[in-house]
Amino acid sequence: MTSPQPAVGTDAATPLRLGTRRSTLALAQSGLVAEQVRRATGLPVELVGISTHGDVSREHLAQIGGTGVFVSALRDALLAGEIDLAVHSLKDLPTAPHPGLTMAAVPRREDPRDALVTGDGRDFEQLLRAARPVRVGTGAPRRMAQLNAWARTHGAQLETVPIRGNIETRIGYVRSGEIDAIVLAAAGLNRVGRIDEAAELIAPDTVLPAPGQGALAVECASGNAHLTAQLAELDDPYTRAAVTAERTLLAALEAGCSAPVGALADLPASGQDATEMRLRGVVGTTDGASLVQLSTTGPVPASAAEIVSQSERLGRELADEMLAKGAAGLMGERAL
Ligand SMILES: NCc1[nH]cc(CCC(=O)O)c1CC(=O)O
């Protein structure tokens, strides 16, 4: 994985060290960003594999707090100066900024939707017509709430099975027939080259993705001003605005990373002429019996300065409306 170091004494540029986990998805994401960084800086970039306790003990990890452990190992390496930059799935990052680190770039987001992989290629509604409860592999409260609500509109029943592991392992449960379907982020499937295996890309009107889903965050040490400026070239202002609105909504609902909150900011009108940004949000009980789903619109930020202020305002506005409709009570079930 590590490309050859330039021999000592040569005048080859010192490579930028991009820290990455070794999962297929992490390597794919890091590889994509490494290529963009090479183009933007003209510097060589080497991938540095970071092993985490979480990679060693996955079962335990799921119980002690999911992907947070992976994020921390990369952040520790950044703060220790062992690596220069790290790439995270934005949806795995806590909403609070991390002291000493800067989110230097949010590259252009790809498909934010959830995808459904099924054993026989049937889509969700076809599966619901089966006589027995459909077994869907997901432990995410957000997905459980919205899939259960969807099943209810068809008078059907779901059985959600909390499966764990990386994308390959999860698809394996469907292929072996242990479960009927699995829900995965389309972006992740796409990055590992398996999007063709999706039976359905789920419309956000039915299942809103996790805040930040499909987007990446490129992080470096705040003190590294030169690199921060170079990485800014990778930033996509529109993606930055959208994920800022989504993550502000999440934070304002005071929801943790595993809370049943879906959010998506997009442009309801297509193309360059869009003047409005729409933010949709949902919270619900995991059984899908109660959902609070609302949307609001605001102006598309016209400048870098407006991205933060306008997107944050949109996120807070929608959170206030959702809280007024009882959102807090629905999330409260997590404490039970
Ligand atoms: N929860 C783990 C995780 N974190 C990011 C992705 C996919 C990539 C992305 O959303 O950018 C996934 C897998 C999944 O939810 O299917």
Image (tube, rainbow, N blue to C red):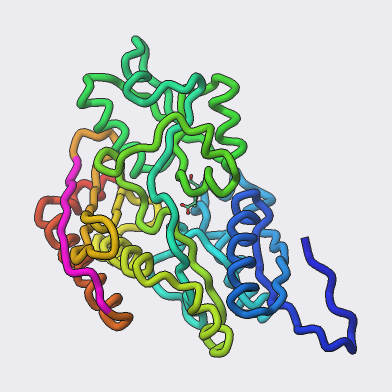
Q: Nearer the viewer, residue 127 or 190?
A: 190
Q: Is residue 294 magenta?
A: yes
Query: Residue placed at 87% from the left, 86% from the top?
Result: 10
Location of residue 201 with respect to 38 vertically, above or below: above
Farthest-out residue, left = 324
Q: Position of residue 25 (x, y in %)?
A: 60, 50
> What secondary structure prevails in the magenta region?
strand
| Residue drawn at (63%, 66%) of the image | 35
Q: Which residues are magenta?
A: 291-302
> Residue 305 is drawn in which quadrant?
bottom left
Q: Is residue 58 left or right of residue 116?
A: right
Q: Position of residue 130 (x, y in %)?
A: 36, 12
| Whether residue 142 is situated above or below residue 133 in the rendered picture | below
Can residue 82 be seen here? The reply is no
Residue that sits furthest to the top in the current view:
131
Nearer the observer, 17 or 235 = 235
Looking at the picture, how far across and down is residue 194, in whole percent?
Answer: 57, 39
Q: Which of 202/59 is in front?
A: 202
Quadrant of image for the N terminus = bottom right
> How far from the left and from the top, in percent, is residue 8?
89, 85
Count all numbered tags in the image, as a single digit.
Answer: 0
Q: Is residue 69 left or right of residue 198?
A: right
User: At 47% from the left edge and 26% from the top edge, which residue is drawn?
Assistant: 118
Q: Say whether residue 49 is visible.
A: yes
Classify residue 183 by image quadrant. top left
In the picture, which quadrant includes the C terminus? top left
> Is residue 109 rendered magenta in the image?
no
Task: Residue at 67% x, 75% y: name it.
Answer: 83
